[in-house]
Image (spheres, rainbow, N blue to C red):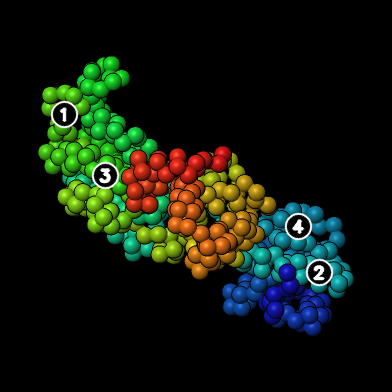
Amino acid sequence: MTAKKNGKILIVDDDLSISRSYQKYLESEGYLVQVAENGEEGIKKVEFDRPDLILLDINMPVKSGLEMLEELRKKMGQFTPLTIMLTAYGDLDGAIKATNLGAYDFLTKPIPLEKLRLSVKRGFEKISFSEQVAYILDEEDTPFKSSIIGRHPSMIEVYKTIGALQGNKATVLITGESGTGKEVVARAIHDTAAKGSPFIPINCAAIPENLIESELTGYVKGAFTGANTDRDGKLEAVKDGTLLLDEISVTPLEFQAKLLRIIQEKEYFPVGGSNKKIFNGRIIASTNVNLKELVECGRFREDLFYRLNVVSIELPPLRDHISDLDLLVLYFMKKVNSNMNSSVKSITKEAVDYLKTHRWPGNVRELENAITKASINVKDRVLTRDSFNFLERESGSGKDDSDQRSKSFFDLFGELVSLKDIEKKYIEHVLANTGWHKGKTSVILGITRPTLDKRIEEFGLTKDE
Ligand SMILES: Nc1ncnc2c1ncn2[C@@H]1O[C@H](COP(=O)(O)OP(=O)(O)OP(=O)(O)O)[C@@H](O)[C@H]1O
Ligand SMILES: [Mg+2]
């Protein structure tokens, strides 16, 4: 790092002949230098000229160096210029006081010019380093009050909708790419409107298709093989709270018809039972698939879609509200520090600027993971541009490279091949990308789950561990 060009220095010393010789020397080194004869004049010059660095004699008439530094600290706090004390030999007491006042370095008179040059140079290195820091975490900072972070207009719209849901039990549809915060928003709706009652999230893709209904409504003894006792479902357990049906897009059409009835009638029967039950909670559905498209290709009931879509919240991908990245980075630095007991203190501007150029296909979740990963290997408690090198390795240049992507897909084959070969490769590709999530895979491929199972068997596909 080089010394700051034209950095401003103020020399405060009652011995003018010494000040002048330092001034001449430091000016020849490229700095802009002012002098003052005592603490009082020094303070005026600091206020007027805003030097970057002060060379401050301790013993002076009218106002001493210590008094001047103390006054500056009171007035300017952390914006006090970096201060190097010029002390008389053996003035230990003065040195201790100056340290307590935050002086950066001490030079004992008489000062060889080379020593002066080095200390000033190091001082400016420190200044330019701290200028590069974008954010410093302060333990005293007030903690984030909300669990949803963001001030972009699209996020403000989200908050407004959450607010409007306070006095009712309207059904809500939350859409957005993976990792955009759909579950966070569902929880916020619940916390605003029904705190104290249960919040139950169900991942529809994780439940076998034929068990989804009974999971919700419960069942009576003997309703199906294995139903050895009566059992309450989630609709019962959630009471007047909130049921989140995550990945609603993968549910079978027959279940969608039942769900529509529950939402409309606010009542249901357990599987195999004839005792009507009342539901007075709220249902929130979420999905990262475009439901409208599924409706068009007959894989999602249109009537249910419109019923769910009465109140809808569309969460923007992170790249569309990248101005929120600064706040999110700070939030996750704090979160990581408290969850993992790490001690990240700051992040450089260069790092934040770099994070803003990344495409974030995994959205806020990917950002959180990146901050966590970088914090584990942090050096000197500062996150730098290099702390995030892994992002480049994980996603090529991190920029939009769809050209490259389509090329690499056909590169997989090397030569011209049959449609069957492409089908096999493509199914394998989607399975790998969804982490062998068969529900999601069949939605993406536009085929039913039994068809997917048949293909997996036919092509002999297996999950790599
Ligand atoms: N606006 C936000 N403010 C703070 N944290 C957020 C925000 N959005 C997302 N997160 C965090 O990102 C992670 C992913 O969020 P969430 O689980 O809500 O995403 P999702 O949209 O449900 O993703 P998926 O579709 O993959 O289920 C969580 O750790 C969450 O705390
Ligand atoms: Mg989710």
Q: Identify residue for label 1.
A: 269
Give the spatial CA distance, label 2 vs label 1: 83 Å
Q: Is mark 3 within 8 Å of ligand 2?
A: no
Where is residue 450 drawn, in percent x and y? Answer: 35, 40
Q: Quadrant of the C terminus?
A: top right
Q: Which residue is mark 2?
A: 118
Which residue is denoted by mark 4 in the rendering? 94
> Camera-side residue: 288 or 210?
210
User: In the image, what residue occupies the spot 24% across and 57% down?
Assistant: 296
Mark 2 or 4: the one toward you: 2
Q: Residue 284 — which label? A: 3
Specify the label residue 24 is tagged with: none
Q: Amino acid at mark 1?
A: Phe
Chain-order first, disc 3 or disc 2: 2
Callout 3 amino acid: Ile
Q: Residues within 10 Å of mark 1 (few under 14, many from 20)?
A: some
Q: Type of residue at label 4?
A: Gly
* Disc 4 Cβ-to-ligand 1 distance below 8 Å: no
Circle 3 — which element? strand
Callout 4 environment at 10 Å: few (<14), some (14 to 19), or many (20+)?
Answer: some
Do the CB atoms of the residues marked 2 and 4 lie less than 8 Å apart?
Answer: no
| Residue 186, position as x, y percentages in the image | 31, 45
The structure residue drawn at horizontal position 27% and vertical position 41%, both measured from the top left corner, is 252
Number of marks present in the image shown = 4
Q: Nearer the viewer, mark 3 or mark 2?
A: 3
Residue at 22% of width from left, 30% of height from top? 217
Q: Mark 2 or mark 1, which is nearer to you?
A: 1
Mark 2, secondary structure of its residue: helix
